[in-house]
Amino acid sequence: MLVWIFSFIFVIGFVLCASSAIPETAEALKTFLFIVLPSVFPLCVLSDWLVRTGAFRLTGRLFAPLMKPLFGVSGTGALSIMTGLIGSYPTAAKTTAQLYKNGEITYEEALKLSAFTNNAGPLFIIGVLGTNMLRSTTLGVILWCIHVTASLLTGILMGKFYRNRHTSLNRKPIPLVEVKKQNPFLLLSSSIASAMETMIPVCGTVLFFASLCAMIEAIQMKELQSVGNLLSMFLEMTTGCQTVDKLSLTSLSEASALLTRCCLFSGVVSWGGCSVHMQTIYIFSQNGLPCSRYLIGKIFHTIIAVGLTGLVMWLYI
């Protein structure tokens, strides 16, 4: 019944607000094609290829001494952390799911990695937020460093909290000898195809939530403007950041306005939005992984990131 009501309201709202919803959806498609796809697709291909060929195991051996004490996972999980730091939503989720599917990490390790590795990328934070919205590449770099730090702190906290939990559903990894028998270039073709399959639901969720945010913005009354702004920040990351960029903070001093804007930006990109969560949940569900630990991790990540941003910006200003 609830699904029917939501669908009915969405259809009616889309028809009534078509003049603003359609252009916003088209703009979201351009954002996907020119920002999301170029920043996510190559790393999705590369991480998938590393897993398929077994080449990632060298990375696992190098980082093994750090992974267990800090995050409570084996060195194999380093690939998810690396793709999460230099990639963008949902590259790390795809990598974690692929590692679990191939039996390279256990069920419990996959849950721990899901809690903190799926992050916004430097291209979006530094380029879009810093250079375009804040008019400062330096601020973009600062926000990205805070984002990364908050992610790693979340991983350490989640690793400590769940350290004594039992490990279940262990899987036997594919022997490296069997992997080497396969042609790596054929595996690259398979990785490209797999990455494209991942991009389709990513594109769909971006367009859907962009149209939803456009309808919310079109129908909200002046008295409910703040509610509409909060919904936009909660639902979709790019639209949420655009909402923050348009906020009128004239009642605050220049320094206070900058601090507030940076904290809001940090919160929006760390949360990721329901659009990102739908993409991630789809990837995890396809590989038998729940999303509860992931969502808990995003809440912790958001709180830590906003707190660090407020402290750093107070010192910076």
Image: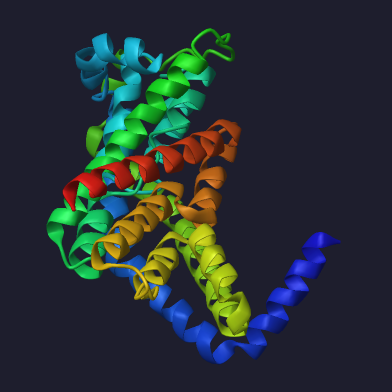
In the image, residue 41 above or below residue 157: below
Q: Which corner quadrant holds the N terminus?
A: bottom right
Q: Is residue 18 left or right of residue 87?
A: right
Name the residue nearer the viewer: 147 or 114: 147
In the image, residue 162 above or below residue 143: above
Name the residue nearer the viewer: 187 or 228: 228
Q: Is residue 298 visible?
A: yes
Q: Is residue 188 visible?
A: no
Report the label total: 0
Indicate the position of residue 41 as horizontal and vertical percent values.
31, 52
Q: Is residue 54 left or right of residue 222?
A: left
User: Farthest right residue?
Assistant: 1
For residue 39, what is the image quadrant? bottom left
Name the residue nearer the viewer: 205 or 245: 245
* Residue at x-position 39% and y-position 57%: 264
For residue 44, what is the image quadrant? top left
* Residue at x-position 47% and y-position 64%: 206
Indicate the position of residue 186 as horizontal and vertical percent values.
28, 39
Name the residue nearer the viewer: 291 or 222: 222
